[in-house]
Image (cartoon, coloured by chain):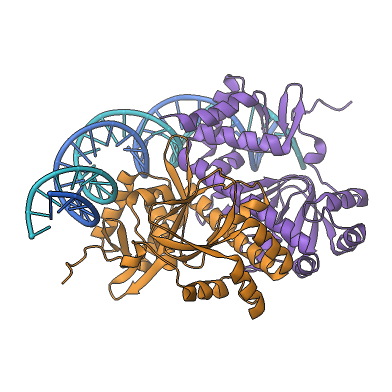
Chain colours: A purple, B orange, C blue, D cyan
Amino acid sequence: MRRKRTTPLKDDQINLGSCSTELRARILSNAPYFRGLPQPAIDAVNGLFRSVSHPAGTALYHEGEPVQALFLVAHGTVKLLQHSVAGDKVVLDLLSQGDSFGGLSALRQGRYPHSAIAQTGCCVLTITTADFRHLLSTYPEVALSALDGVVSDLEAAHDVIRALSTLPVEARIAQVLLDLADRLGEVHEDGILIQSPLSQRDLAAMVASTAATVSRVISSLRRRGYVDTGRQWIRVRDRSALASLADEAEHAR
Amino acid sequence: MRRKRTTPLKDDQINLGSCSTELRARILSNAPYFRGLPQPAIDAVNGLFRSVSHPAGTALYHEGEPVQALFLVAHGTVKLLQHSVAGDKVVLDLLSQGDSFGGLSALRQGRYPHSAIAQTGCCVLTITTADFRHLLSTYPEVALSALDGVVSDLEAAHDVIRALSTLPVEARIAQVLLDLADRLGEVHEDGILIQSPLSQRDLAAMVASTAATVSRVISSLRRRGYVDTGRQWIRVRDRSALASLADEAEHAR
DNA sequence: CGAGTGTTTGAAGACATTCAAAAAGGGTGG
DNA sequence: CCACCCTTTTTGAATGTCTTCAAACACTCG
């Protein structure tokens, strides 16, 4: 019998992911970009995508490389980050099933403005920029959906800027945990488990802090019973307590 | 004869601005959104816009209000900001001639995610969200341009996030000054004058700091001869020196 | 079991904030 | 043109949050 695993994360969130054609079809027809297209169009779109598997930790692309494709997460989680020259990283986002990324920069500069790393083993659907551009002009509603998606990303980025500008570390961490819990969380009776390996270094890179500080804050949250944590995983036990931490910080002063 | 003005800023950047129909036509045909449309289409577009003047300091809209229009700056500068509940503000961007803002959020939530304040007396062209939506579906190339513009805004926001995450205050200020000089600057023999009234409080709200700290940093930059400053204005004298300040901070450590 | 990575914790110190108060700039109305 | 007022800018001193550096500990994998 297998030894009890200590991480509560699902295996397939950690190990190599692969795409069944069934999954692939489901992802594409549910993707915000293509939802609403007539079935024949969806079939045509389906033909333009390739599915690729990436082992955990590998890069899908690096900041500065010429843009080659637009990506759609089918399975697993993908981390978007920027490197600073000094070597420390800034994590911009953590994406999961149904999220898209990468290719839209092609419309502009033609270079990826950030790197994408497989946070888990994952499967992504890719479409070449040329094909996607073609889609955009063929189906205007796709362009509108894309616009919608990017506007939403922009607002999220502005929220991060506000948090970095006005909130102390603890509140920023609380806020990020809430966001991740809502987007990647899996509800259990003992709390919301964030379904992705997430080191405190990663967390630090999301809130503009350091691993040491994050550890201190997280420990304090754990002592207060707001979260459970372990190596590379976090479970939110008291969502509303975290929410008030983030809010009170804003009202303070 | 008129007394020598102490501010080097242009009068019409401070006082009420108005839109000549000539200016209006020029702005619209040069706007990234509509550039490339055939002339009849541009004329049609022209008919959908209204031009509105705003005195300096007045709000074009407030965060949270329902989105009513998309805006295009014809003259003057406009400040986009978010309020924190504690009352301090976060300045997201400073826009000038040709920049657009506001209405794209309509596609999503229907509420403005930030406020817009006339930094100078200014003239803006507005189009209702309904009309703009109509434009988007009528002319697919407009949707593509809009997409392009938002992607560019998103990348700018990510750059701000990186700066806030990795750079000390001085470097962030240097970076913002460079950006403003490039976008709002007017080249003179004695440096690049940022053509918009800009208080140190505003600057502080752009780099997530305080007026007191900004004053100290700016004074230091002035002593080193990198900038000239006065009440509500800044001139960049040594662009490359500022650039190295921002760069060295990244390479340090 | 040993190596490597992730987490915890302490102590010292830096950078920036906060609070406060004074000085300077610019507009306004007499 | 001057006196007044309000806002912006400047500067000092004290404080604090967070970082840095270091070392110990824990967990996982080969």
Q: Is residue B33 visible?
A: no
Query: Residue B239: percent from the left, percent from the top?
Result: 36, 67
Report the front residue among A27 and A218: A27
Q: Is residue B23 above or below residue B150?
A: below
Locate the N terminus of chain A by quadrant.
top right
Report the front residue among A215 and B141: B141
Query: Residue B12: percent from the left, percent from the top?
Result: 34, 66
Q: Residue at x 42, y 62 (%)?
A: B122
Report the front residue among A16 and B118: B118
Report the front residue among A249 and A36: A36
Query: Residue B86: percent from the left, percent from the top?
Result: 44, 34
**In the figure, is residue A148 to the left or right of B155?**
right
List the single residue furthest toward the bottom. B39
**In the figure, is residue B40 to the left or right of B25?**
right
List the single residue furthest toward the top. A224
Rendering quarter of residue A143? bottom right
Rendering quarter of residue B248? bottom left
Q: Residue at x 66, y 75 (%)?
A: B41
**In the figure, is residue A178 to the left or right of A16?**
left
Q: Is residue B107 visible?
A: yes
